[in-house]
Image: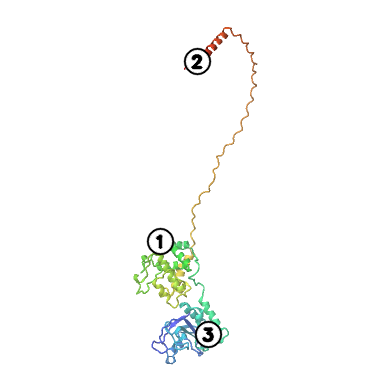
Amino acid sequence: MVIIIEDFIPRGRRNRPGYKLVPRYITIHDTANTNVGADAMTHARYLKSNAAAAIPASWHFTVDDRVIVQHLPLNENGWHAGDGSTGTGNRESIGIEICENRDGVRTEAEKNAAWLTAKLLKDFSLGLDRVKQHYYWSGKDCPRVLRGRAKGWESFLNAVSQYLQPPGNTPITGKAQATVHQAQEWARRRQAHARFIEIAPVYWLYGALTGIRPEVLYAQSAKETAFGRFGGAVHPDQNNWAGIKVQYPKGDSRADFESFPTPEEGVRAHFNHMCAYVGLQPVGVPHGRYWVVLAQPWAGQVRYVEELGGKWAVGADYGISIVRDYLEDLLATPSPPVVEPPSPPPETTPEPPTQPEPEPPEEPAPEPPPPEIPGPEPAPKPSPEPAGSFLVELILRLIDFFRELLKKLAQKLK
């Protein structure tokens, strides 16, 4: 990292016009001054001189092999692009001059200029295509050293590109890299309030709806709300998970921060607010502050968590803190084991109780030989019936005959 020294041109001088600048481009120059000692500080003195004011000439930074000197605030324009008082180069670009002093190390000066260019691109969420040569605006052969060297301009842009995406940049959009159960386990380990643990599934729901990584915003909410414990100007009943201010705040009191009717609405607002930063469509009707963000020059161009510093919050390390102090720990937390309910035992047909095998019957003892059965005795010869018994039987039959005959006669008489 190179030291940046502020040494501003005094207000009111002709080469500090003071027109409002909203940076949309970065213009690269060479100083065309090869004198010994013509370093960044020497050019700072020059810009405060009457000679520079008379032209008028001014730019934002001069870079040598050791330091960077800033001459104008980044919200004011300079006269450096040669395209007139209303030209896009003068009115919408930041001017950088690279020193050519022969007692300096030019390669180091170019490295420092590439680093500064990348920093400004990230600070203002601009793409590499917004880096222009002075030649682009006015046709002047500048930056002459880069233009005069074979593939000099290409190598400079490659160096800028290397600084644009150093290792560790954390994308805001994309697929979730943590599960909701993993995030809740992380929150429990960090002694989070129950409300913060319970709201986690809603973050994963809106992550799927918007394409924003839910674990990134959940980690940001942990930073903003102290894991749901709050304790600052924002109160829990405001359901404001991200410290979102009202459309036109007056300070940092409770009234300056948005209130949402339910915790779920607060999560929706958090995702909608981030949609304005990264260029995605909001879900439903967004809150008032969303439109303020959408009007910023960098709106829709933020790609990495680390870029949130100076935009979402004043601190330059705001996004770095989200990653370092919260997100990395969340991603390193193992998911809790999933406890599945016990499955019912399989239905089985009861087996009949086992019958004991019958013991083999004992062999019967041999029966004794049957006793000898005596043969049948001869039946006795019937003795002849006496003659009187025949007469008795005959008399009885005659009585029965006459009795039946009398019954029939009695029936006829009737």
Element assignment for label 3 = helix
Image mark for residue 194: 1
Judge left or right: residue 368 versus residue 240. Answer: right
How busy is the neighbourhood of tag 1: few (under 14 within 10 Å), some, or many (20 plus)? some
Residue type at mark 1 is: Ala
Q: On the image, numbered disc 2 is attached to which residue?
A: 409
Pick out the residue farthest to the top.
387
How busy is the neighbourhood of tag 2: few (under 14 within 10 Å), some, or many (20 plus)? few
Task: Give the mark nearest the N terminus, 2 or 1.
Answer: 1
Task: Give the mark nearest the N terminus, 3 or 1.
Answer: 3
Residues under labels 3 and 1: Cα distance?
Answer: 58 Å
Which percent across, then down, holds residue 252?
35, 72
Residues under labels 3 and 2: Cα distance?
Answer: 170 Å
Task: Give the mark nearest the N terminus, 3 or 2.
Answer: 3
Work out whether 369 lies above or below 123: above
Residue type at mark 2 is: Leu
Which percent across, then down, holds residue 358?
59, 34
Work out whether 120 lies above or below 85: above
Which percent across, then down, holds residue 297?
44, 78
Image mark for residue 408: none
Element assignment for label 1 = helix
Residue type at mark 3 is: Arg
Give the camera-side residue of 296 and 183: 296
Element assignment for label 2 = helix
Give the camera-side residue of 85 and 32: 85
Residue under the point 50% across and 83% down: 132
